[in-house]
């Protein structure tokens, strides 16, 4: 009898939808305070996940949800870099 390994589920911080980790975009705050998109899903630091949609990105930007999660002010350049990764996908 084979035992199937469960795929890790993560929750989108914009729409609260639970999806498999590889179907979400991971945003990381490193120990030195840099915030960036983690395309590998393996970078060190505090991670937050959003759906790979413009709608969810706009929602977290408008509600300042990312700022609340990372407890820091988020520069507009961070949102633009996330938007750039969404366009590439």
Image: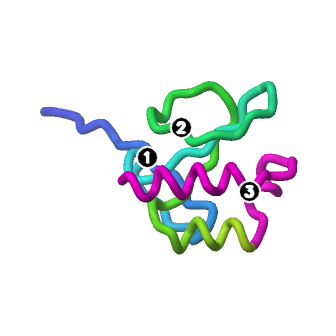
User: Disc 2 vs disc 3: which is toward the camera?
Assistant: 3
Q: Residue at x 54, y 58 (%)?
A: 83
- Disc number placed over residue 38 in the picture, else none: 2
- Disc number placed over residue 34 in the picture, else none: none
Across and down, in percent, residue 14 comes to 61, 67
Residue 72 part of the magenta segment: yes
Q: Earlier in the sequence, mark 2 or mark 3?
A: 2
The quarter holding residue 29 reads top right
SS for dot 1: helix
Q: Residue at x 57, y 42 (%)?
A: 37
Q: Nearer the viewer, residue 3 or 74?
A: 74
SS for dot 2: strand
User: Disc 2 vs disc 1: which is toward the camera?
Assistant: 2
Across and down, in percent, residue 86 comes to 45, 57
- Is 9 positioned to the left or the right of 45 in the image? left
Q: Nearer the viewer, residue 19 or 44?
A: 44
- Is 5 positioned to the left or the right of 54 in the image? left
Stretch in magenta:
63-89
- Is 68 positioned to the left or the right of 19 in the image? right
Task: Tell me the residue that label 3 is attached to.
Answer: 76
User: Disc 3 vs disc 1: which is toward the camera?
Assistant: 3
- Disc number placed over residue 21 in the picture, else none: 1
């Amino acid at each position: 009898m084979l035992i199937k390994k469960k795929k890790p589920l993560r929750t989108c911080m914009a729409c609260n939808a639970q999806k498999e980790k590889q179907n979400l975009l991971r945003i990381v705050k490193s120990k030195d305070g840099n915030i960036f998109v983690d395309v590998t899903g393996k970078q060190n630091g505090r991670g937050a996940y959003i759906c790979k949609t413009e709608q969810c990105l706009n929602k977290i930007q408008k509600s300042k949800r990312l700022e609340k999660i990372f407890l820091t002010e988020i520069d507009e350049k961070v949102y633009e870099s996330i938007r750039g990764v969404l366009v590439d996908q």
